[in-house]
């Protein structure tokens, strides 16, 4: 059962379209899994619609209707199938729609794979990625630069703030210093969007980070 949810202000920001792309992807994945937050997000959408009703209508430009109808006729762009290393996981629809890069093992038990959240490509320091770890694996101790949004796709991990299981949402920031550990129950796959690469404590971990182009 889902225990950790986005705060109401995040659901409101998601409904209003003001979250960064990667963070919005994390919230979208949570909403697929969480009926409670879907209902709350629906309320925020209704509130936004009520505000729009107060806005005076603007005249449409010439040809706007034809353009819109032409766009409806266009075929859905072909999306590539998710890579085979994800085939044993039930991945959220919102994630399956993204471009997922090849995975890179940083230890025999841990890999990362980049996700291109639309519009986020090579823009600023934000990065979105998958991180996988085998059961009973501890990730390198780190803190953050800015906020880090997490959606647990499969399995569970614990840190000083709690245990996060499939469907759970986690938000950390530069005040949190942790070494998340995957529980003994099984492997864990998470989707993460960070405003900047993590701040790793140990030299070997920083070396691996540098070798991977500071993608994580
Ligand atoms: Zn929720």
Image (cartoon, helix red, strand yellow):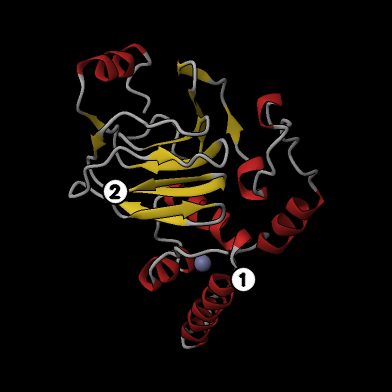
- Tell me if label 2 and label 1 are in contact, CB under 8 Å: no
| Residue at x 54%, y 38% (from the top left corner) | 189
| Residue at x 40%, y 29% (from the top left corner) | 122
Location of residue 173 with respect to 216 vertically, above or below: below
Q: Quadrant of the N terminus?
A: bottom right
Local SS, label 1: helix
Q: Which residue is mark 1?
A: 35
Q: Quadrant of the C terminus?
A: top left
Query: In the image, which is nearer the foreground, mark 2 or mark 1?
Result: 1
- Residue 141 percent location from the top left of the image: 26, 32
- Residue 106 percent location from the top left of the image: 42, 17
Q: Which residue is mark 2?
A: 147
Local SS, label 2: loop
Q: Residue 63 is drawn in which quadrant?
A: bottom right
Location of residue 41 with respect to 200 vertically, above or below: below
- Residue 137 percent location from the top left of the image: 43, 30
Nearest the eye: 55 or 24: 24
Q: How many marks?
A: 2
- Residue 102 percent location from the top left of the image: 57, 20
Residue 108: tell me if it is visible.
yes
Q: Characterize the local packing of mark 1: few (<14), some (14-19) or many (20 or more) Cα atoms within 10 angstroms.
A: few
Nearest the eye: 118 or 81: 81
Residue 90 as seen in the image, left or right of residue 160: right
Q: Which of the marked residues, 2 or 1, is nearer the chain's N terminus? A: 1
Nearest the eye: 21 or 165: 165
Residue 4 as seen in the image, left or right of residue 144: right
Q: CA distance from mark 2 to mark 1?
A: 25 Å
| Residue at x 40%, y 57% (from the top left corner) | 19
Residue 24: tell me if it is visible.
no
Residue 148 as seen in the image, left or right of residue 86: left
């Amino acid at each position: 059962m889902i225990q950790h949810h986005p705060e109401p202000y995040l659901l409101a920001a998601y409904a209003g379209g003001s979250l960064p792309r990667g963070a919005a992807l994390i919230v979208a994945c949570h909403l697929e899994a969480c009926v409670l937050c879907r209902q709350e997000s629906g309320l925020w959408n209704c509130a936004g619609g009520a505000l729009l009703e107060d806005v005076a209508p603007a005249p449409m430009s010439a040809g706007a209707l034809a353009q819109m109808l032409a766009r409806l006729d266009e075929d859905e762009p072909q999306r590539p199938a998710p890579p085979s290393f994800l085939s044993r996981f039930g991945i959220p629809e919102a994630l399956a729609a993204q471009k997922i890069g090849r995975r890179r093992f940083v230890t025999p038990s841990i890999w990362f794979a980049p996700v291109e959240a639309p519009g986020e490509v090579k823009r600023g320091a934000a990065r979105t990625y998958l991180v996988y770890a085998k059961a009973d694996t501890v990730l390198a101790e780190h803190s953050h630069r800015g906020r880090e949004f997490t959606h647990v796709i499969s399995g569970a991990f614990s840190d000083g703030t709690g245990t996060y299981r499939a469907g759970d949402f986690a938000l950390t920031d530069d005040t949190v210093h942790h070494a998340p550990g995957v529980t003994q129950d099984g492997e864990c796959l998470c989707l993460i969007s960070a405003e900047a690469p993590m701040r790793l404590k140990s030299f070997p971990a920083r070396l691996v980070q540098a070798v991977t182009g500071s993608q994580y």
